[in-house]
Image (cartoon, rainbow, N blue to C red):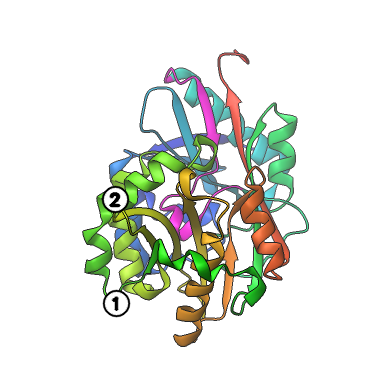
Amino acid sequence: MPNRTINIVKKPEEILKFLSMGINIPLWPEFSKYTIFDIKYFNAQSLVLVENNALAGHVLVFSSDKKILYFGFFGVLNDMKDRIEFLLEKLIEFATDKGFETLRGPVNIPTIIFGWGFMEEGSSTTLFAHKPVNSPLYPEIFRQKGFSEVLKEHSFEGVFSRVPPEFLEENINNDYELVTFDSWEQIESIKIEFLELNARNLPPTSVVTPSSSDVFENYLEFCKQYGDPSVWVFTRFKKTNELIGCFTTTPNPFDKKSFVLLTIVLDKKHRSMGLGWLMADKLAANSLKKGINYCTTFVGTHVSSSREMSKKMGLPLLRTHTIFSYSLQNNA
């Protein structure tokens, strides 16, 4: 029987040394500032599995309130079943001892780089920002141990082109204005409007990262370094000048000819009018001008409109990731 212990690491710079145990996405040195920002904001800690005096596993834990403990970067050496079960048992013990009601994850902060969810079997394993890769053993064990699926996200992914003309409703342009920007400062100037648009239209099931508005600046800095502001598209309602829609993307530093289509938001009062297709076409046009022709999405299984749009654009379903939840009270 191996000698196993758990060490708790709290210093952000020390935590960085262990994250690679729980993620396949490279931790480039230039990512450190973004990662440390989130680690400090969420007061994250690492539970480090040591086996026979050697590093054997890791999980990051953090929270934004006293109810939910989030975890991320969950991984063990050689993906051994008994190591996964041991680390999971210690994670549950830690959350219970700290008085949390629920465990949820994996959420790998900052998610703009490292993403969320355990990848399900059959998914593409190519390197892409926001798309973690793991052995199918992880979600299997979490299910066996009583974790339930709180969110399942599909990644429709591939080379894209302009939207077929038959999907475009040009006649609505008299009431709406599509807006794109040449600088990140212009996007930053509408930060409050943008966050309010998301807050009033995204259902709770679509919000993965806690306190996402508080780490917005950190995410924007990442986009400034690797992305292009022209591939964010907004829509204003001309009569009120209100911001009522947006398509936002995040860069893929590992292939600058691609991006993650992170959010599609349209105000409830302005849906079912073809605005989504107009924004998608504008995004495609601007992206192709920049030499970007490949995208991946994160579409919750509960969002039928985005799923149908992806299919009509000819993007195949290549990956599935699942976020799990565990009730510490019901399983006490």
What crowding class fits label 2: few (fewer than 14 Cα within 10 Å), some (14-19), or many (20 or more)?
some
Q: Residue at x 72, y 33 (%)?
A: 143
Q: Where are the magenta residues, as a range?
A: 98-117
The one nearer the camera, 270 or 7, is 270
Q: Residue at x 31, y 49 (%)?
A: 215
Say which amino acid is labelled 2. Glu
Q: Residue at x 63, y 58 (%)?
A: 133
Say which amino acid is labelled 1. Asp
The one nearer the camera, 32 or 207, is 207
The picture places residue 154, in percent across and down from the top left corner, at: 66, 54
Give me the disc on residue 182.
1
At numbered mark 2, what does the secondary structure look like: helix, strand or loop?
helix
Q: Is residue 13 visible?
A: no
Q: CA distance from mark 2 to mark 1?
A: 18 Å
**Which badge, 2 or 1, comes first in the chain's sequence?**
1
Give me the disc on residue 193.
2
In the rendered image of this protein, does residue 22 appear above or below residue 68?
A: below
Most frequent secondary structure within the magenta stretch: loop
Q: Is residue 118 visible?
A: yes
**Quadrant of residue 188 in the image?**
bottom left
The picture places residue 326, in percent across and down from the top left corner, at: 60, 26
At numbered mark 1, what does the secondary structure look like: helix, strand or loop?
loop
The picture places residue 286, in percent across and down from the top left corner, at: 45, 79
Give me the disc on residue 35.
none
The one nearer the camera, 326 or 167, is 167
The picture places residue 291, in percent across and down from the top left corner, at: 49, 87
In the rendered image of this protein, does residue 321 appear above or below residue 95?
A: below
